[in-house]
Image (cartoon, grey):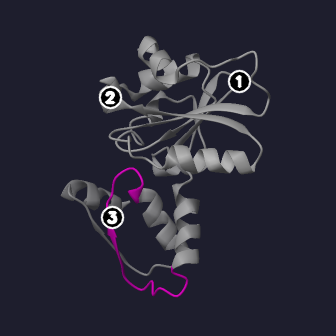
């Protein structure tokens, strides 16, 4: 698998890498059209950082979602500084990490992995990201009854954010009834 990743990455001139240079990737399925590379690169440019952002599409690489741990280790071994994790790997990656932030542990899902001191640490920024966007975009939306579509990797984070924002009641709808029921019971 490392050979596949090396081909995907091209070359990284480690000798020229400065302290403010980062190699980061997005792991997920069907992520070719993702806006993450442009968004991350744009913010890195504004912050004066050198940022190399690569898509690690498990479909393109021929890797099953359950093998996300192997892909995460390979990325760390190749010198990645961190990873973003998306569908369908947010919950699957948890068991392959060395540590979790309190929020990631509470939600059982990770959307960010930071490699520090040889350890892979999982974080979840979906709660704060959703809450901030919701408050900014729909500041006057009534929260007495909210219908949430989706109970997957980000579903628990969105439900938590909605409760934090003051939702009185949340109805969870998902293509898998048992997943919606599990989130509603949590």
Of the 4 image quadrants, the one containing the N terminus is top left
- Which residue is drawn at the image coordinates 52% and 64% (left, top)? 130
- Which residue is drawn at the image coordinates 66% and 21% (left, top)? 118
Q: Nearer the viewer, mark 2 or mark 3?
A: 2
> Which residue matches tag 2?
60
Q: Label for residue 184?
A: 3
Question: Is 145 within the magenta?
Answer: yes
- Label 3: few (<14), some (14–19) or many (≥20) C-alpha neighbours in 10 Å: some
Q: Label for residue 24?
A: none
Figure label count: 3
Label 1 element class: loop
- Label 2: few (<14), some (14–19) or many (≥20) C-alpha neighbours in 10 Å: few
Question: How many angstroms separate mark 3 from mark 1 (CA)?
Answer: 38 Å
Of the 4 image quadrants, the one containing the C terminus is bottom left
User: Residue 183: horizontal and vertical position, in percent?
Assistant: 34, 59
Question: How many angstroms separate mark 2 from mark 3 (CA)?
Answer: 34 Å
Q: Nearer the viewer, mark 3 or mark 1?
A: 1
Q: Earlier in the sequence, mark 2 or mark 3?
A: 2
Q: Are marks 2 and 3 in contact (CB under 8 Å)?
A: no
Q: Are marks 3 and 1 in contact (CB under 8 Å)?
A: no
- Label 1: few (<14), some (14–19) or many (≥20) C-alpha neighbours in 10 Å: few
Label 3 element class: helix
């Amino acid at each position: 698998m490392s050979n596949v990743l090396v081909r995907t990455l091209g070359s990284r001139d480690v000798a020229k890498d400065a302290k403010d240079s980062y190699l980061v990737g997005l792991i997920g399925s069907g992520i070719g059209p993702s806006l993450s590379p442009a968004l991350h690169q744009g913010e890195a440019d504004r912050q004066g950082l050198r940022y190399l952002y690569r898509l690690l599409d498990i479909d393109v690489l021929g890797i099953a979602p359950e093998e996300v741990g192997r892909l995460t280790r390979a990325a760390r071994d190749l010198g990645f500084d961190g990873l973003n994790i998306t569908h369908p790997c947010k919950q699957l990656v948890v068991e392959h990490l060395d540590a979790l932030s309190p929020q990631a542990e509470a939600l059982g899902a990770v959307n960010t992995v930071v490699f520090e001191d040889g350890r892979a640490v999982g974080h979840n920024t979906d709660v704060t990201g959703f809450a901030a966007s919701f408050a900014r975009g729909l500041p006057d939306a009534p929260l007495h009854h909210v219908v949430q579509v989706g109970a997957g990797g980000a579903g628990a984070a969105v439900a938590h954010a909605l409760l934090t924002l003051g939702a009185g009641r949340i109805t969870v709808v998902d293509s898998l009834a048992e997943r919606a029921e599990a989130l509603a019971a949590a």
